Amino acid sequence: MKTYLIIIMALMPFAVSVGQESFKLAIKTPQPEIASGLIELDNGNYIITGIRLNDNVSPDSKGMIWLVNAYGILIDSVEISKQDTIVYLGKVQKYGNNYFIAATFAYYENSDRRNFPVFFLVDSALNLLNEYRIPLDSNYSFIESMGTVLAGDELYIGGNARNKNFTEYYTDLFICKYNLQTHVLQSNFLALTGDQLSTGYLKTSNYNIIFSVGLWGYPPDYSYGYYTLFDNDLNWIVTDSLPDDICLNNSSINLNDSTYLLSGRQSVFIAPPSIDEERSVLYKMAFPNQPINSYKYHMGTDTLSFPAGSSIDTTRTGEIYFSGTANVIPYQAPFQQDPSWIFLSKLDRDLNPIWTKLYGGDMFYQVYSVKATHDGGAIMACITYDHRTQDYEHDILIMKVNEDGLIVGTGEELSNISVQDAIVYPNPGNEYFHIQSGPQISGALFELFDMNGNIVLTTILDERVETMSTIKLSTGTYPYRITFQNKIVGSGKWLKK
């Protein structure tokens, strides 16, 4: 079974006639691959980064850089490899007229894992211009970077590091500053009580924030998120809890010197320690740790949704894209048999939702990163897995949508991806089902029919998640229809077991 990197690009209406015929399956390789980093170049091309695995336990997996044009055609690709080393490529940032790619080299030394950060400078044609290796503190066996920011020639890195003194603590937080011209390195390693697992990093004009989860005990402390504040000289200022139990999958973006966006996960414990619901949340924060507004994406009880590793970006006009994976089963993913959806919400500056679209639902989908594009749309790096046809392999899907969340174009891959304003799940189900709908169809009419065409259930969709009891319904198949402003915006069949 081959693994596919699928490039599906959608252009704004003025360019559709130019590019539709060139939308196609761009890369086919026999190895599993993951795409994690994205950037749109000034000329409309895209640099995509990730990893190519020889197999699930390969000691020499390769870092990958792909160059794709505005119409979804692969122009070039570059492998970065080192013997007996796993090479991860991630975030891409612009540096002058070139592009700066964050990487991690991982290898084993006497059965002990070693990690250290590496950075590559490439031009817009993927020519390798320079390589920067950050020296590892001798007291630490590996450094795991959870975020990098370029500020002029200064490279800031935040993350966690494993201290060799395992008897007292396992991982510490670290922050470092490296000058790309002088090669001067400044760093600070912070040992707090218990383990510290870094989950994100934010650089402001005067401060650095490392987001983390503190592993002090379970339940409930395991799930609590923290922020740690450093000044520009890397001096520690304070560590405190994040509001509303925000933790894990922390993406962040500065809006200005006083406000920023922070995403993460939020667990809902109805009967601890069991997690009954996990939400993907986005907060507008006043510096350093005060919530202003929030937006919460969830699918109701008994379901989990995770934001992407890089889940937020802003458009040139200030709108916000927020993306993640809906209906995740943690012990199965990324080889999940149950279907999932990629959700993409477009929000205004105050986090009021404009629309939410759901992509997929026919197999397992997971999104790794989202970026706003110059035309007002968004591009997402995702993976898919279909247990019916694949044996523990996944495909890569690079999907671009327009400013209304629609995939536009032609090609056999496109017809297989459902884009929906509302979904019905679980399907099949038994005693109930949920209806999740986007704000763009608030007030829509949902109707469920028996096979004779009689209406058996109906409701108005004025909430994000509606739950319908089906205890009184017999087993069988029930068609449904969703109508908004005299147009059918959704339809399908629900099966009661």
Image (cartoon, grey):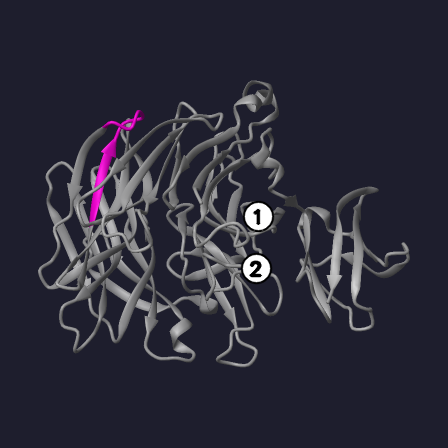
Asked if 302 appears above or below 291 in the picture, the reply is: below
Tell me the crowding category of disc 2: few under 14, some 14 to 19, or many 20 or more residues within 10 angstroms, Cα based: some
Q: Is residue 129 left or right of residue 249?
A: left
User: What is the C-alpha distance between the residues marked 1 and 2?
Assistant: 23 Å
Q: Is residue 445 visible from the viewing direction of this image?
A: no
Q: Quadrant of residue 476?
A: bottom right
Tell me the crowding category of disc 1: few under 14, some 14 to 19, or many 20 or more residues within 10 angstroms, Cα based: many
Measured as percent of width and height from the top left, residue 18 is found at 56, 18
Q: Nearer the viewer, residue 309 or 494?
A: 494
Q: Is residue 152 left or right of residue 475?
A: left
Q: Nearer the viewer, residue 267 or 69?
A: 69
Q: Amino acid at mark 1?
A: Ser
Q: Nearer the viewer, mark 1 or mark 2?
A: 2
Q: Is residue 58 left or right of residue 84?
A: right
Measured as percent of width and height from the top left, residue 268 is found at 53, 72
As helix, strand or loop, the secondary structure at mark 1 comes to strand
Check residue 345 in the rendering and tell me which mark sits there, or answer none.
1
Q: Is residue 280 left or right of residue 439?
A: left
